[in-house]
């Protein structure tokens, strides 16, 4: 075990907000100092659970926005039998795509990485993570799901030391190359997700005005960065926040409550 545990930095934001780029830049900056750092991304599509999630995200059906979408309509007319059985088949096929089921899979995908994450942190390795708990809550609540229900399966997970929320203008992010290829990537849904992220931001511990993070806190610190700035200036401010994080001992983590 190392004398100091690694730091856990999380990037959150909408699709195409620059998370992957900033994750890579922070990782490089840490490694250049001779410190070990590893990158994790959620969902981790390589695990068995992650493969189910990947199939779901690549699926063509649009995000559900109402509870009970899978309720089968009862019809009396015999001419509707074919339509009815189509409905039933679709419901069977989509049972794996139920909003609650997929939410739990995203959470399970985090739980299956906990042992590894603890081991890395305790041996002094920094973790730079692309999406985690907050995406889990924001994307599901954007479908109209209950906040407490969405939060519950993640309670007990190791929480990050610092959350960097890359706040992007939706006009900009949805126009970026590659946007629109996966399930949640519609402008309308992204704006609902953004509202949820803004709620989470209000609940989080804000950055202190003097830019020092040595605040005694029971929660990770949340930094919102304007993601329309240049890649370089975003990266510079991320690194300066990283530099001001307090050292902690192995086993001493924030736990998501
Ligand atoms: P990427 O584009 O980053 O691969 O994410 N998502 C993610 C959820 O709905 N719940 C979660 O818990 C996580 C981690 C965000 C794919 C999509 O999955 C969403 C976008
Ligand atoms: Mg994406």
Image (cartoon, rainbow, N blue to C red):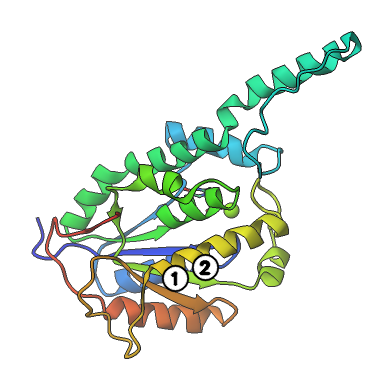
Which residue sits at x=38%, y=63%?
10
Q: Where residue 54 sits in the image (x, y, percent)?
A: 55, 39
* Residues at discs 2 and 1 in contact (Cβ within 8 Å): yes
Q: Nearer the viewer, residue 124 or 104?
A: 104
Looking at the rendered structure, the secondary structure element under dot 2 is: helix
Q: Is residue 60 left or right of residue 125?
A: right
Residue 14 in sight in this render: no
Give the residue at the far top of this rendering: 78
Location of residue 70 (image quadrant) = top right
Which residue sits at x=25%, y=63%?
36
Q: Where residue 38 sits in the image (x, y, percent)?
A: 32, 57
Residue 85 to residue 45: above or below: above
Q: Within 8 Å of ligand 1, the CB of disc 2?
A: no
Give the residue at the far right of this rendering: 79
Q: Is residue 17 left or right of residue 24?
A: right
Q: Where residue 100 sits in the image (x, y, percent)?
A: 51, 36
Give the residue at the far bottom of this rendering: 210
The residue that disc 2 covers is 198
Looking at the rendered structure, the secondary structure element under dot 1 is: helix
Which residue sits at x=40%, y=77%?
238
Which residue sits at x=27%, y=47%?
156
Residue 192 in sight in this render: yes
How many neighbours does mark 1 have within 10 angstroms: few (below 14), some (14-19), or many (20 or more)?
few
Q: Quick one: quadrant of the C terminus?
A: bottom left
The residue that disc 1 covers is 202
Residue 209 to residue 253: above or below: below
Q: Nearer the viewer, residue 257 or 20?
A: 257
Q: Where residue 125 sits in the image (x, y, percent)?
A: 23, 60
Residue 4 to residue 137: above or below: below
Q: Within 8 Å of ligand 1, the CB of disc 1?
A: no
Between marks 2 and 1, how big is the CA–CA gap?
6 Å
Q: Nearer the viewer, residue 16 or 189?
A: 189
């Amino acid at each position: 075990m190392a004398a100091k545990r690694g730091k856990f930095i999380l990037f959150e934001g909408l699709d195409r907000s620059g998370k992957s780029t900033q994750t890579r830049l922070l990782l490089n900056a840490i490694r250049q100092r001779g410190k070990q750092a590893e990158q994790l991304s959620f969902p981790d599509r390589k695990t068995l659970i992650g493969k189910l999630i990947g199939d779901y995200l690549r699926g063509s059906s649009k995000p559900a926005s109402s509870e009970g979408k899978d309720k089968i309509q009862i019809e009396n007319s015999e001419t509707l039998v074919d339509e009815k059985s189509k409905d039933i088949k679709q419901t069977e096929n989509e049972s794996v795509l139920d909003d609650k089921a997929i939410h739990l899979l995203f959470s399970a995908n985090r739980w299956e990485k906990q042992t590894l994450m603890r081991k890395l942190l305790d041996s002094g390795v920094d973790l730079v993570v692309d999406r985690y708990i907050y995406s889990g809550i924001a994307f599901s609540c954007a479908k109209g799901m209950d906040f407490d229900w969405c939060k519950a399966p993640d309670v007990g997970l190791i929480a990050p030391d610092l959350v960097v929320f890359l706040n992007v203008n939706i006009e900009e992010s949805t126009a970026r190359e590659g946007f629109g290829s996966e399930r949640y990537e519609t402008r309308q849904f992204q704006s609902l997700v953004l509202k949820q992220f803004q709620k989470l931001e209000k609940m989080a511990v804000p950055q202190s005005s003097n830019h020092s993070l040595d605040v005694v806190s029971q929660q990770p610190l949340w930094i919102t960065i304007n993601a329309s700035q240049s890649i370089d200036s975003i990266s510079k401010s991320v690194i300066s926040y990283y530099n001001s994080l307090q050292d902690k001992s192995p086993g001493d983590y924030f736990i998501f409550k």
